[in-house]
Image: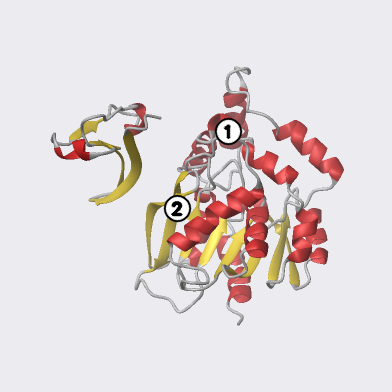
Amino acid sequence: MNRHVAIERKYVDGPCGQIHFIKAHPNGSLIQIKPPLVCFHQSPVSGAQKEIAAEVRRFLDADT
Amino acid sequence: MADIIAKRFYIDGPYGQVHLREAKPLSGKSHKTPLICFHQSPISGIQYRPFQDVMAADRIVWCPDTPGFGGSDAPPDVVTINNYANAMVAVLEGLGYGKSGAGAVDVFGGHTGSVIGTELAVTRPDLVRRIAYPSVALFTDEQRTMMMQRFGGPPEYFTDPDFVSNVYKKTVLEGHAELDPERRLELFAERLRSGMKAWYAPEAVMSYEAEERLGELTQPALILVLDDMLAENSRRAGALISNSTVVEMTHIPHALAWDVHADEIATAVREFFDQE
């Protein structure tokens, strides 16, 4: 695992129930520099298909 | 289903995030002691979902995934039952329970979950008020050897081309007809999530001194003897626990207990947990 990146999994409420997503962001002050990036996966896989090194961006990877 | 609300979330634990599902009465409130349920491996807390929803009619019920199973992060290496119990300490303290929090909860655990619950109850009595077992993983030396031969070491995902299809055939295509096919598929998919570390839990169970620890248990314990490979083991466990009640329910197959017989199991468990 990249020690410069913090990764956590979370849920948010959506119209059909909870939506699961993986949030990755840089450890440190770079988090403020660039706008967050949201990635939508192909089906029938999930957001877990992408191993992201979010060195400079906060990264939101949502399960459809 | 009773009027309940359910949600899934994560709590930080010693190996990363622990995933759990919470169900509680629609009002969001209950004066009854919350219940936490520990599952058998290699499934996850999803195993108990129908039972959880029945029990949640009048209390908060949490079903966490043991580290390395379901949605919970895995430990980096082989662990002990004490390590798993400590992860559940983090969960309960994260939920606000324990000596310096809202006090103790009730525990329910079968197979791997039975020894995690036992270890938690013995090491942290401030966190466990009562404990109920739908089966107890108390093995003889002969059974330990047999179980290690069967479940020890990494699963054969990359060495046996038929491994996954055999499990699929056994649990989904030829699984219990009383379970909805989609439920069988759900449980099959869940067991795959533990991947190559699936053997950590049986390894920990087989290394656990269950006989000694069950004798140290001080909390009231309920043992439900189901139609299960651990039926006789569970009866034997009842004799080791100083304050135990053993209830024979061998008309209920363990594999169907949480789905088909959820109401009946809940009635027995509720009667035990609702005592002062």
Disc 1 crowd, CA 10 A, few/some/many (<14, 14-19, 20+):
some
- Nearer-N-terminus badge (1/2): 2
Which residue bears the numbered disc 2?
Answer: B20
Residue B263 in the image: above or below residue B31: above
Amino acid on which disc 2 is placed: Leu
Residue A30 position by quadrant: top left
> Mark 2 falls on what kind of element?
strand
Quarter occupied by the N terminus of chain A:
top left
Residue depicted at 61% across the width and 30% down the height: B167
Q: Quadrant of residue B105?
A: bottom right
Asked if labels 2 and 1 touch by Cβ distance under 8 angstroms, the answer is no
**From the viewer's perspective, is B238 left or right of A49?**
right
Element at label 1 = helix
Identify the residue at horizontal 59%, vertical 74% (top origin).
B273
Residue A60 visible somewhere in the drawing: yes
Above or below, B181 against B254 in this view is: above
The C terminus of chain A is located in which quarter?
Answer: top left
Q: Is residue B233 above or below residue B265?
A: above
Residue B40 picture location, percent across and down: 62, 48
Question: Which residue reaches farthest front?
Answer: A29
Q: Residue B62, position in %: x, y? A: 48, 60
Which residue is farthest right? B142
Q: What is the number of the mark on residue B72?
A: none
Q: Chain of mark 2?
A: B
Which of the 4 image quarters holds residue B175?
Answer: top right
Q: Chain of mark 1?
A: B
Q: Amino acid at mark 1?
A: Lys
Q: Report the Cα–Cα distance between label 1 and label 2.
A: 19 Å
Is residue A18 shown to the viewer in this render?
no
Which residue is under mark 1?
A: B197
